[in-house]
Image: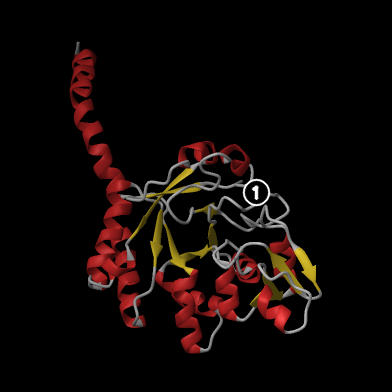
Amino acid sequence: MKRLLNLLILLALAPSLLALLPRLQAEHPGPVVLLMDAEALREEARAQGKDLLAVLEAYRPLGVEGIAFPERFVKDWVAQGALLYRTGRELLEAGLPAKPGWYYLKGEAWLLDLLAQAYDLPTERLGPWLGFPLDVQALPAFYPLSEIRAAKEAGFYVAVRPINQRYRRLDPSVPIVPQEADAVVFAGLEALGYPYRLEEARERVPVPVALIEGTPQPGLAAYREKGILRLFSLRYEWQLTLTPEEAADKYVLAARERGHQLLYLRPYPYRQDTERLLQRIQEGLK
């Protein structure tokens, strides 16, 4: 009789215990990775005369264990000086037999070789120049691969942010998702391959993908079998209106109460504020 009574008491308590489960999970959150945006961090690195990895390492004691690399556009490589860009008309005027309506790139050989395979567009080689019939400045153009390798070798969690674009080839020979990547966070407002090439694109993504809170990305459901990681980020313009502590509390809330595994961060203009942000997040996740 006593055993039956104890069983009835346990059954009566079960709903209360289930109701407490989310609270217990919130007070003891699972693994959370703090991801720093590589391009946002790059300005700080340049201002200090350091490379990206050195600045990233300085944030490691404050809990940053990951870095996210947004995919670059061709124009970003041009701005950096890795590529030169000229119209066909300009090359004609310089005495080269270029096509007047085409657009040409010259620069680092490894990057030109990748771009020659990157798009479903005709190309031509004109000495050191690579030509296209369309202006390719706004087309996706991969990542700084040496930095990705260095970050991985240093033990950082690496995410990449590929761009969906209708002209890009979803070819296994090009690093749309480099082999060092631990996760994919799709850039823009749609998943890679949306709308008509999702099956092909899925084959190029061997790692989990992120579900960004507040940012619907059509086509993301096609990647569920790869694994879904919940990601929280603040729009940078809004972050700048918040104190570091206010921003940190929003990140902590996302991790503790909504189960986000990736916290996507961008540094404040002043390093002291970034340190305050990270310290508060660390305290909140303990």
Residue appearing at x 78%, y 79% in the figure: 96
In this picture the colour scheme is secondary structure
The reply to whether residue 286 is visible in this rendering is: no
Query: Mark 1 falls on what kind of element?
Result: loop
| Residue where numbered disc 1 is placed | 170
* For residue 236, side relative to residue 178 (left or right): left
Name the outermost residue toward the right. 127
* For residue 47, side relative to residue 193 (left or right): left
Q: Quadrant of the N terminus?
A: top left
Could you tell me the amino acid type at mark 1? Answer: Leu
Q: Is residue 47 above or below residue 68?
A: below
Q: Quadrant of the C terminus?
A: bottom left
Residue appearing at x 48%, y 72% in the figure: 39
Q: Nearer the viewer, residue 58 or 130?
A: 130
Q: Nearer the viewer, residue 250 or 145?
A: 145
Name the outermost residue toward the top. 1
Q: Nearer the viewer, residue 92 or 208?
A: 92
Task: Please provide percent x and percent y for residue 111.
Answer: 70, 69
In the rendered image, which quarter is residue 235 located in? bottom left
Task: Please provide percent x and percent y for residue 60.
Answer: 46, 72
Residue appearing at x 58%, y 79% in the figure: 80
In the rendered image, which quarter is residue 20 located in? top left
